[in-house]
Structures are given as C-alpha cells and as structure tokens.
Amino acid sequence: MSLNDPQRTESPMPAEQDIEVALRWADMDANRHVNNVEFFRILEEARARWFPTTGDGASLLASGIVVASQGLDYAMPLSYRHEPVLVGLRVTRVGTSSFTLSCRIHDASADSDDRVYAAGNVVMVAVDDEAGRSRPFTVQERSWLESLSR
C-alpha cells in the first residue's frame, strides 16, 4: 500500500523508539485537522525528549545539534483528541557529523491496527556553535547513535 492510502497499516519500524506527544487544541486548522506545520512541532518535541540527558548521547543536545533537512509524507488527517500520538524515531544512517532519523507519527491500541498519519526523515547535524560549522561526532556520540541503528 502507498503511504497516501488512508487504510494503510504498518508494523513498527525495527528498533523504533516511540515517544508520546500530546496534541494541543491550537494545533487544529480550519478543517478541524492538525495543521501540517504542527506535525513538525510534534516531531521537534519528540526529538527533544528522545535525546538522553546522561550517558554517551547526552553531549549531542548539550553541545549543539541542528536540523539540516526534514520531510514528511502525510498519510491521513489527524484530528484533535485528548490522547497523545506516538512519534516513532529510528536512526537509519550515521555519518561523520550527521545522522538520519526515520520518523512516523502514529497511534496504536490493543483493539486497532497501527494508524500512520505521517512518515518521513530528518537529517540532524552536530555543530560547533563557536566555530559556526559542523563538527564530527565524538566516539561516545557515534557509539550511542550506532547502537540505535541496529
């Protein structure tokens, strides 16, 4: 099935980590759907929660990381509700100073199939804020990222 098929269901990605993100009433547009721009806010919130605050990957968020590119394919409308959505994140590529996260905004419950609202990729780059350019990952950062890509 194509991503644009509203009946599409999909198993979670291998090694995917799900993060719950609450929807806000203000996320809706005039059609009573979560606005397409708000999907990126939801992804941003999930990424901020995904980075560890201690251990090998903690320095990435603390020392500087930026979004180099991101893209989403929208599969079906998402309407406001009290229950949070799940944001599945998975490292799919690790480079010298950048990595790619596959992401999907979805939900699942015991009584329904996994429903995917949007899926895409985000490329993140480690930066040296003082120098104003990218920097290579440390050994610890690379180890953490590679452990998530298996």
Image (cartoon, rainbow, N blue to C red):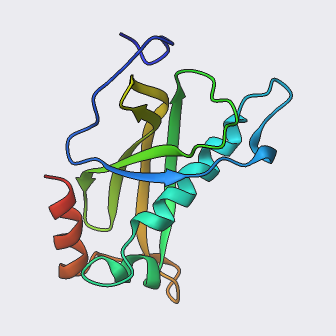
Q: How many marks?
A: 0
Q: Residue furthest bottom?
A: 130
What residue appears at the point 47 percent right and 60 percent down from the top-left corner?
47
> Residue 131, position in %: x, y?
49, 86
Vertical order, 11 against 150 (above or below):
above
**Quarter occupied by residue 61:** bottom left
45 or 132: nearer the viewer: 45
What residue appears at the point 25 percent right and 76 percent down from the top-left corner?
141
What residue appears at the point 81 percent right and 33 percent down from the top-left corner?
29
> Residue 37, position in %: x, y?
69, 41
110 or 142: nearer the viewer: 110
Vertical order, 26 against 32 (above or below):
below
Relative side of 13 to 65, left or right: left
Vertical order, 132 against 23 (above or below):
below
Relative side of 51 to 70, left or right: left
Q: Residue furthest right?
A: 30
**Quarter occupied by residue 45:** bottom right
> Residue 42, position in %: x, y?
59, 50
Relative side of 113 to 47, left or right: left
> Residue 145, position in %: x, y?
24, 65
Quarter that holds the N terminus: top left
